[in-house]
Amino acid sequence: MREHASTVFGEMSALAVATGSVNLGQGFPDTDGPDLVRDAAIRAIREGRGNQYPPVHGVPELRAAIAEHQRRFYGLELDPATDVCVATGASEAIAAALLALVDVGDEVVMFAPWFDLYAAAVSLAGGHRVEVALTAGTFRPDIEALRTAIGPRTRVLLLNSPHNPTGSVFTREELTAIAAVVREHDLWVISDEAYEHLVYTGSEHVPFASIPGMAERTVTIGSAGKSLSMTGWKVGWATGPTDLVAAVRVTRQHLSFVSSGPFQWAVAEGLALPDSYWEPFRDGLEHQRDLLCDGLAALGFPTTVPQGTYFATTDVRPLGYDDGWAFCRDLPHRAGVVAIPHEVFHDDPDAGKPFVRWAFCKRPEVLEEALARLDRAFG
């Protein structure tokens, strides 16, 4: 695990504090989620629900709410008693799924760039990661490259859409082509869909488990932190067929055992919020996306406008930098802004070297301040 001893997010967030920079590196919103959900957590604490250990696989009310959420939005039918596992955030759910499904020496294939947790969790499981680069610049899945990357030791495809860090949202056609490869090689799939509700105009989130033949071989990961803007509560989940979720439950209970007590009841209420919450939530983030992307483009940053998530990607070469790491380490001192280099999301550092990720899940006035600082430095 030595290669995972430190994270870029810790380094860059510390640098943001030390330099007084606007932190567009780490992906967390700077506003809290709905009052109804926060009030529900306070009420649960006062009523003594969850102040002691909750049920090991999640309180029944939350498991039922997660199952209903999957039915309501995607038509997926789950038994909350057997097909849902609540975790300490999506991060623990992903780690538990990898520990459950990967044996020592197994290969895990994932599209690159990938979220850094994936690499660490594969190492914890004793597996080997195999990366398949998304197409350069457009960040779409390359199906033939995926097929070529799969070998006799490949056990799991670790999928992520909406995709962090690029913001790509894979289409139904792309996911159907990926599913054909999965069937051909008899793989299990861990599908990280933490950003499922952060999908913007013109795109659609299609759960991988909804693709024909994939429900029985897919563990789907969800996150209240992203969907309800409560990242500090660390409430996530894994859903899927009973046999795979049973395996995830075994490993997950030996990680944190239980967590997020009163917050579980609050998230159950949050997942049942009407469309009058979900639509403005998405529209507000889309406005923030456009504000940042338009501003970056006007300053000369070639920008890939994301279809989903919190993140936009720019190429820093027109600004005189060949290396995103060098740019990101220089940026706080030069401009008072923090971003994250794509290089850390690849095993092949040259693949992501000129690209940088920016988080737009910040208040408009914060984004405007960041753009003003960048204008003074690069305008």
Image: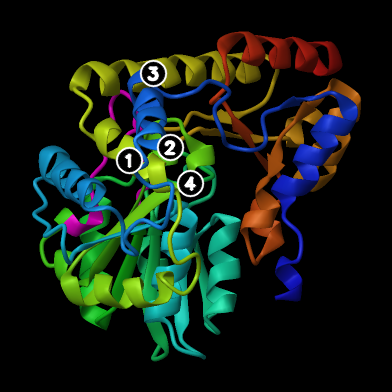
> Where's the N terminus, which quadrant?
bottom right
Q: Nearer the viewer, mark 2 or mark 4?
A: 4
Q: Residue at x 16, y 38 (%)?
A: 73
Q: Which residues are magenta?
A: 192-209
The first of marks 1 and 3 along the sequence is 3
Number of residues whose C-alpha sits closer than 10 Å to that of mark 3, classed few (under 14), some (14–19) or many (20 or more) = few
**Circle 2 is placed at which residue position?**
226
Give the image location of residue 162, x and y in percent.
38, 43
Using the numbered discs, state the Cα–Cα distance from disc 4 to disc 3 in whole angstroms.
18 Å
User: Which residue is at the front of the view, 230 or 158?
Assistant: 230
Instruction: Say what amino acid the circle numbered 4 marks.
Output: Lys
Cβ atoms under marks 2 and 3 closer than 8 Å: no
Instruction: Say what amino acid the circle numbered 1 marks.
Output: Glu
Using the numbered discs, state the Cα–Cα distance from disc 2 to disc 3 in whole angstroms.
16 Å
**Circle 1 is placed at which residue position?**
196
Q: Is residue 297 left or right of residue 212?
A: right
